[in-house]
Image (cartoon, rainbow, N blue to C red):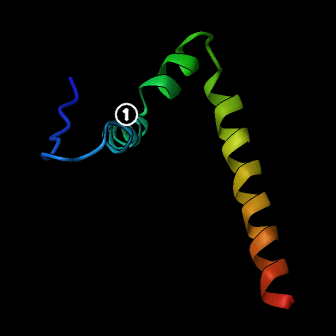
C-alpha cells in the first residue's frame, strides 16, 4: 500500500501527482502486463540485445553530430 504524506494547504492535484509518480516507480502495471503471456527466455534475451544495439546506434549518432 502506498502512503503519500499530504501537507496542510497542499492541493489535491499535487498529491495525486505524487501518488502517480510513486505508483509508476513500483512497476506494478508493467509486471502485470508482462505476466499476461509467457515469453521464452531466448526471446527475452534477443529483445534485450536488439534494444542494446539500438541504444548504441543512437549514442554513436549523437556523438558524430
Taking depth in this image into account, of 44 and 29 the one nearest to the observer is 29
Quarter location, residue 40: top right
Q: Secondary structure beneath disc 1? A: helix
In the drawing, does residue 1 fall left or right of residue 64?
left
Where does the image place residue 58, in percent across and percent down from the top left? 80, 69
Where 50 sits versus 45, above or below?
Answer: below
Where 53 sits versus 35, above or below?
Answer: below
- Give the quarter of the figure containing the C terminus: bottom right
- Residue most extreme to the front: 9
The residue positioned 20% from the left and 37% from the top of the image is: 4
Taking depth in this image into account, of 15 and 64 the one nearest to the observer is 15
The number of discs equals 1
In the drawing, does residue 5 fall left or right of residue 36?
left
Where 64 sits versus 45, above or below?
Answer: below
The residue positioned 17% from the left and 41% from the top of the image is: 6
In the drawing, does residue 56 fall left or right of residue 41?
right
- Residue most extreme to the top: 36
- Residue most extreme to the bottom: 64
Where does the image place residue 12, in percent across and percent down from the top left? 32, 36
Few, some or many C-alpha atoms within 10 Å of disc 1 (few <14, some 14-19, many ≥20)?
A: some
- Give the quarter of the figure containing the N terminus: top left
Name the residue that disc number 1 marks. 23
The residue positioned 61% from the left and 13% from the top of the image is: 38
Quarter location, residue 62: bottom right
Amino acid at each position: 500500500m502506498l502512503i503519500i504524506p499530504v501537507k496542510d494547504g497542499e492541493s489535491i492535484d499535487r498529491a495525486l501527482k505524487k501518488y502517480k509518480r510513486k505508483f509508476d516507480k513500483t512497476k506494478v502495471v508493467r509486471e502485470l502486463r508482462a505476466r499476461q503471456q509467457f515469453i521464452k527466455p531466448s526471446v527475452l534475451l534477443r529483445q534485450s540485445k536488439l534494444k542494446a544495439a539500438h541504444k548504441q546506434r543512437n549514442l554513436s549518432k549523437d556523438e558524430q553530430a
